[in-house]
Amino acid sequence: MPADLHTRARTRIWIDFCNTRIHGTTHEINRGKDPESAKAKLKQHFVTVEAALTGGDFLIGNYSLADVTFIPIFTRLSRYGFSLDDDLPRVKSWSERCLNRPAVQTTLIRP
């Protein structure tokens, strides 16, 4: 976590966003009555993230726990029948930056 209180608060907000909105929506995709509607909602959540990524490579500037929180989602998007396409270019490149970090690569299971 960042030492600066403002940045620490922003980190916690993004962690909460992922845990409550993104994870909740992926649950709706897997177990809900209307998975297509849930996919549209997930897309809107990523539109929010897209807007936040205008200032740098990561959510709060430097790579942080805020980014790490999203990595499990990125690894499971295909299971949800969802992909980050070209209309979310910043989210797509951010997910690739996160997934390509050496520490993350060592944790990914390869077929």
Image (cartoon, grey):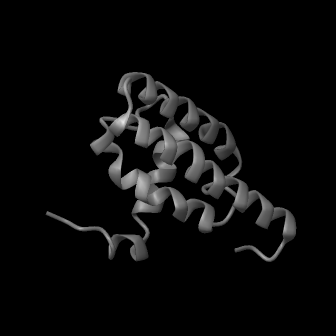
The residue at 45%/59% (across/down) is 71
**Residue ranking furthest to the right:** 5
Q: Is residue 104 above or below residue 80?
A: below
From the viewer's perspective, tell me whether residue 38 is left or right of residue 52: left
For the residue pair 66 and 21, the one nearer the viewer reads as 21
Vertical side of 60 occupied by 29: above or below: above
Q: Position of residue 97 (x, y in %)?
A: 47, 58
Point out residue 41 in the picture as x, y percentages from the top left corner.
Answer: 51, 28
Q: What residue sits 66% from the left and 37% below the top? A: 51
Residue drawn at point x = 72 percent, y = 54 percent: 13
How many tags in the picture? 0
Left or right, 91 with respect to 54, comes to: left
Indicate the position of residue 94 as horizontal and vertical percent values: 51, 51
Quarter of the image with the N terminus is bottom right
User: Which is nearer the eye, 97 or 4?
Assistant: 4
Q: Quadrant of the image for the C terminus?
A: bottom left
Asked if residue 11 lies left or right of residue 26, the reply is right
Residue 31, quarter of the rendered image: top left
Q: Position of residue 35 (x, y in %)?
A: 36, 27
Based on the displayed image, in which of its 4 quarters is residue 80 positioned?
Answer: top left
Against 39, residue 107 (above or below) is below
Residue 91 vs residue 41, the one in the foreground: 41
Q: Image point 42% across, 76% down: which residue?
A: 103
